[in-house]
Image (tube, grey):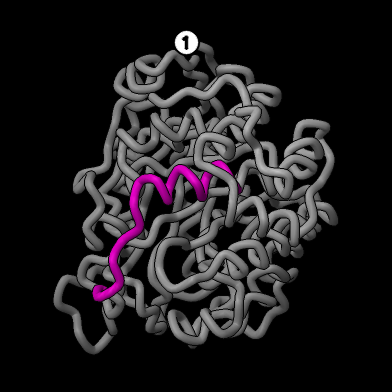
Amino acid sequence: MIEFNTISPSVSSSLSPIVTKIQKQERITNQEALTLYNTASLSLLGTLANDIRERLHADKTYFNKNIHIEPTNICVFDCKFCAYSRKLSKKEEAWEYSVDEMIQILLDHEDQEITEVHIVGGVHPKMGLDYFVSLISEVKKVRPNIHVKAFTAVELEYMCRKAKVSYKEGLQILKDAGQGSLPGGGAEIFDKVVRKQICEDKCTSEQWLEMHETAHSIGMPSNATILYGHIESPENIIDHLSRLRDLQDKTNGFNAFIPLKYRNGNNQMSDIKEGSVINDLKMFAFSRIYLDNFPHLKAYWPMIGKKTSINLLAFGVNDIDGTIHDTTKIYSMAGAEDQNPTMNCEEIVSLISSVGRKAVERDTLYNILKEY
């Protein structure tokens, strides 16, 4: 694990006032953020991010005991970066689970202490609001105390549009059925030009932000993401984070931010080379510095890999997600390192402890359940 303890005295004159603001816990502007992103060394970004992480969380690193269920990979949208989705007319490597089949997945894990079920998948034209209300209701029957974190804003926008209900009405229906929060997927990049190139037909950036703001307004917290390492520019990254920071100022409804690395396997953008681990470290550290109102920064280990995840614990990260009892395929089909992404509790604790951090089991809302 890479560690940084002191900021180098050789910080440039252009960076010095920015660094001073960060150390004083003052918010940096977008122009200052761009200067920092373009000119700061990785060691400086790492030091600043780690200082913030340790001020907020000391050496604690969070994880939870969760299970992922993916109802289907059949999807009406055509995201160029996606290796996961299949069209309804082309069912090779496609699946669509019934409610009973998904409940059976939960029952197969009934002897395990799982506190969260994460439900995300493709946008299937025949799986609508009623279908998912039924699913959540059945989940709560067999696991009454489990937290249901479900559906990206992309899924929810389509769901509400097909059901002819407002975002608030649709979310309230799902909340009444037992849904507790939203994941952060589907944000990708908010910039319209980039979005048009990589995911033109899915919900807009404005719709994504409106969906999360609406969820926050009815007491459903959420996470936020960015898809980085493809054709985006530093300006696009800062614009994306700025919109999230502004919404968090308004609602305080986001729990965690999760940068998601672009993986180039088996998709329509496979000619784009994946970013380096150095770029990963930079992205996470910069996110921790810029998003001064987000309490948690998460490295999703099935996507980024276990080795990079533990290195990121020195670059602002204080959460590595969970045990992932599942057959998650969104990243494995795109070439992620972990093709069978499952770790048990002991493995996660050992991984975190191996770099001198303290493993802490949490629930979805970051209530501490156990310290190791």
Q: Which residues are magenta?
A: 270-286
In which quarter of the view is residue 122 placed?
bottom left
Q: Secondary structure at mark 1?
A: loop
Q: Is residue 179 visible?
A: no
The amino acid sitting under disc 1 is: Tyr
Query: In the image, residue 50 lies at what x, y percent?
Result: 59, 29
Which one is nearer the viewer's eye here, 181 or 177? 181
Q: Does residue 323 lie above or below 87 as drawn?
A: above
Q: Name which residue lies at 55% across and 70% down.
A: 189
Residue assigned mark 1: 372
Q: Name which residue lies at 35% across and 16% down.
A: 354
Q: Name which residue lies at 74% across and 55% down.
A: 32
In the image, residue 279 lies in the stretch drawn in magenta: yes
> Relative to 117, is 12 on the left or the right?
right
Which one is nearer the viewer's eye here, 186 or 152? 186
Which one is nearer the viewer's eye here, 213 or 140? 213
Looking at the image, the residue that sits furthest to the left is 92
In the image, residue 143 lies in the stretch drawn in magenta: no
In which quarter of the view is residue 240 placed?
bottom right
> Relative to 247, is 192 on the left or the right?
left
Which one is nearer the viewer's eye here, 125 or 338? 338
Mark 1 crowd level (few <14, some 14–19, many ≥20, 10 Å Cα)? few
Q: Does residue 319 lie above or below 262 as drawn?
A: above
> Relative to 7, is 322 on the left or the right?
left
Q: Name which residue lies at 44% across and 73% down.
A: 231
Query: In the image, residue 14 lies at what x, y percent?
Result: 72, 49
Query: In the image, residue 35 lies at what x, y percent?
Result: 67, 56
Q: Quadrant of the N terminus?
A: top left
Number of numbered discs present?
A: 1
Query: In the image, residue 268 lies at what x, y percent?
Result: 28, 80
> Relative to 246, is 337 on the left or the right?
left
